[in-house]
Amino acid sequence: MTDSVTAGRGEAADATPRPGGPASRSPRTPATSRRRHRTGLAFTLPAMVFVGVVMAYPLGYLGYLSFHNYRPLTSPEATWAGLANYARLLTDSTVANSLSVTLRFTVASVALEVVLGTACAILLAHVMLGARGRGSRLAAKLLGSAYIIPFAVPAIAGAYAWRMLLDAQFGPVNALLGSRTPWLVDYPMASIVAIDAWKMMPFVLFVMLAAVMSIEPSQYEAAALDGAGALRQLFSITLPSILPVMVITAAFRAVDAFTKVFDTVFATTGGGPGDDTRVFPLLIWRTAFTHLDFGAAATQAVAALAISLVFGTALLLSQRRNDR
């Protein structure tokens, strides 16, 4: 009797719709979507207002200076210049060269980071998923956390460390290679690209590792039953599955590399030799604090902000396209 009651309870419990199950889910109506939109806006609005208030004055003053001539050594007052600073920006060969250098750096750095980061993420996922014993699991966990160390190192500290490593006379790199190559002089662009990739590749690896680990194992099992080897699975399952994340990550890194590459170049090559590594953020800094031409520097900063907005808009559009 007790067994039959228990069984009946079990059947009744099984018949009861579970929270989140098919019977308990209600179709999303326009009213529900509007309510969720208002809730999300209520949570994010305070942060948006705070960031807007904090950034309003600097951005407004930046725009104000871009239309003025302000050289503290010449005159303590800012004089109206109209569009003269923007006209000079469009015709200045130094600005054009700096933008070209920054673009080449961005393309090379992001390509290297995405390719190596994705490859390392796939290999690391294979190691972590293939670990069986306690020792191998511990080693996989250590390996899965150690790769983030370069990303945690401050950019300026890492740049100075690499400057010592690449020193022509006393650097360990030349000691290992048995040469006296001045890397930062003979190969300045390749050097700063390698240093930036060492610093930022862990970020790409972290994102791509999450993307690889989210792939359903059943896809690989079905492919193995069909006779697909590891290489076929890589190009038919892994890469197509993580391609949207790879594109978004590359776009995000392009924005960051184009507009924020300063510490590495400043601490290693200083923009040289000549103008070979004078990236755009470094040009803005020199215009403001070396030449003390704050009007021209503000105009260059506005141009950098516009480029960042273009990259950011492209990132959002690509993400929205992938969500569809």
Image (cartoon, helix red, strand yellow):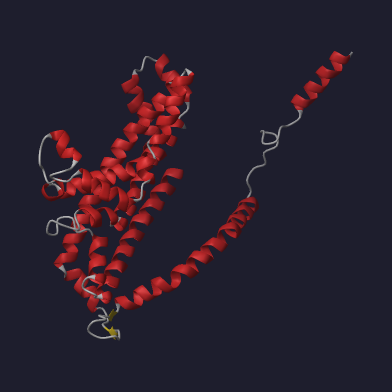
Residue 214 position, x and y percent, is 47, 32
Image-based side of 306 in relation to 185, left or right: right
Q: Nearer the viewer, residue 211 or 71?
A: 71
Image-based side of 232 in relation to 191, left or right: right
In the rendered view, tell whether residue 205 sits above or below residue 105: above
In the rendered view, tell whether residue 318 sits above or below residue 239: below
Please name the residue shown 31% across and 57% down the image: 260
Count of all numbered marks drawn on residues in the image: 0
Residue 234 position, x and y percent, is 34, 26
Please tell me in which quadrant of the rendered image residue 170 appears: top left
Q: Is residue 177 visible to the viewer in this orientation of the structure?
A: yes
Q: Nearer the viewer, residue 274 or 125?
A: 274
Please tell me in which quadrant of the rendered image residue 123 appears: top left
Please name the residue shown 16% across and 61% down the image: 97
Q: Nearer the viewer, residue 139 or 46?
A: 139
Q: Residue furthest front?
A: 170
